[in-house]
Amino acid sequence: MADDRPAGAAPARRRGKPPARPAEPWTRWHLLVAGAAYVVIVAYLIEGRGLSGWLPFLVAALPALLIGKQWKALLMLGAIVAGVGLVVSLLLRSGWLGG
């Protein structure tokens, strides 16, 4: 296919989806949060749910990795939910929401 663009013209824009952003590398904080989440989830599955053998260790791996990678977003979501809950609680207590 011949290049029909005039000299000095900008290169043709590629159609379709833009290139994906490279994945963020795991930091010490990601690993620390993932490790702590793994320990807590395994302890809950063994003590709280009574699972035994290899099952709790296998079941806890995926949630711990997700929590480890997304801990900042989960922390922000918790802060937003707590703030909204506080405002609704104060409005209910004051009588503005009919409580």
Image (cartoon, rainbow, N blue to C red):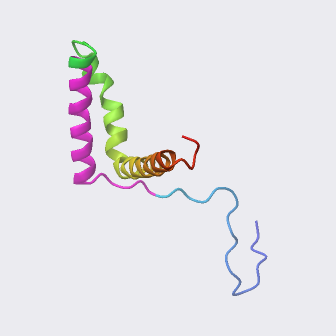
Image quadrant of residue 48? top left
Work out which residue is located at the far right of the displayed protein and give it. 4
Residue at x 33% of width, y 54% of height: 25
Q: Indicate yes or no whether the magenta region holds residue 27.
A: yes
Which quarter of the figure is the N terminus placed in?
Answer: bottom right
Residue at x 21% of width, y 39% of height: 36
Image quadrant of residue 46? top left
Q: Indicate yes or no whether the magenta region holds residue 78.
A: no
Residue at x 25% of width, y 45% of height: 33
Height in image: 31 above or below 52?
below
Work out which residue is located at the far front of the displayed protein and give it. 95
Residue 55 percent location from the top left of the image: 28, 16
Viewer-nearest residue: 98 or 69: 98
Q: Main secondary structure of the magenta part?
A: helix
Residue 72 percent location from the top left of the image: 36, 52
20 horizontally vs 50: left or right: right
Residue at x 21% of width, y 46% of height: 32
The span picked out in magenta is 22-46
36 horizontally vs 70: left or right: left
Which quarter of the figure is the C terminus placed in?
Answer: top right
Viewer-nearest residue: 3 or 87: 87
Residue 60 percent location from the top left of the image: 30, 27
Viewer-nearest residue: 7 or 75: 75
Residue 78 percent location from the top left of the image: 39, 47
Q: How many marks?
A: 0
Viewer-nearest residue: 32 or 74: 74
